[in-house]
Amino acid sequence: MQIIHYPHPTLHYKSKPVKRVDAELRGMMAEMFDLMYAARGIGLAANQVGLPLRFFIMNLAGAKGEGEELVFINPTISRTTGTDEAEEGCLSLPGVYGPVLRPAEVLFSAYMPNGEKFEQKVNGMFARCVQHETDHLDGIMFIERMDEDSLYEIQPEVDQFELTFERLRSEGKLPTDEEIAAFQKDMEAKYA
């Protein structure tokens, strides 16, 4: 398992709701935390590691053994209030940052791996991370939330990711669309 980079097709795939959690899926969630910490992140959506499933992990401390490791399965944001602009980055676009305007406070619900549902109103970095990761599950990258001028400033960096992706694919170092679709179908049959 590895973190995939923009413009990998799975990053624009609308994730399917998770219907069951087994030991294998729990293992993948644990591996995602290791990948997230290694990349110095605070959140990671399933489709960022190629999984077409609707869940993400988060630890605002960004370090193993610190903060709280959270897994949100089938998250939904039901209410938002206020606005807040802050710089965001993404483990699928490492080194690229830009300002994103988002609601300041959100009410969201999700399931924990044990099947327990919870609902919480959050703000600050917690709210921003929940929105950023939920966007991923809907196939939306943070750069799609940036205003035109800010996006223009980082476009050369984004273009470089596209060129790298095309080069790696032409060298056979990345899966084809058909291989990705077959993997997604298998995972969905098992968990969605």
Image (tube, rainbow, N blue to C red):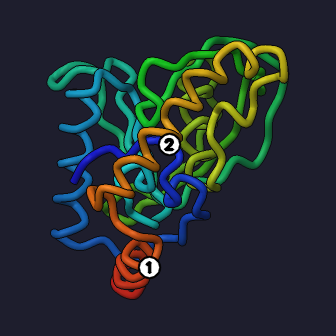
Residue sitting at x 40%, y 87%: 189
Q: What percent of the width, then of the height, locates residue 50?
A: 38, 59
Sequence-wise, the earlier of marks 1 and 2 is 2
Asked whether disc 1 touches disc 2, contact meaning CB atoms under 8 Å apart, the reply is no
Q: Residue 186, image x and y in percent?
A: 35, 84
Identify the residue shown where x is 22% and y is 60%.
Answer: 26
Q: Amino acid at mark 1?
A: Glu
Q: Considering depth in this image, is 82 or 48 the residue closer to the camera? A: 48
Please, what is the three-letter code of the amino acid marked with disc 2?
Answer: Tyr
Q: Which mark is residue 29?
A: none
Residue 121 screen position, x and y as percent: 65, 33
Q: Which residue is mark 2?
A: 6
Q: Nearer the viewer, residue 186 or 82?
A: 186
Eyeballing the image, is 112 above or below 186?
A: above
* Quadrant showing the N terminus: bottom left
Q: 147 left or right of 28?
A: right
Near-viewer residue (173 or 88): 173
Tell me the residue at 75%/32% (across/down). 145
Depth check: 91 or 86 in front?
91
* Lateral position of residue 101 relative to residue 50, left or right: right
Q: Residues within 10 Å of mark 2 (few under 14, many from 20)?
A: many
Label 2 secondary element: loop
Q: Residue furthest bottom?
A: 189
In the picture, measured across the screen, residue 189 lies left or right of residue 152, that is left
Up-down: is 124 above or below 33?
above
Which residue does the numbered mark 1 point to in the structure image? 178
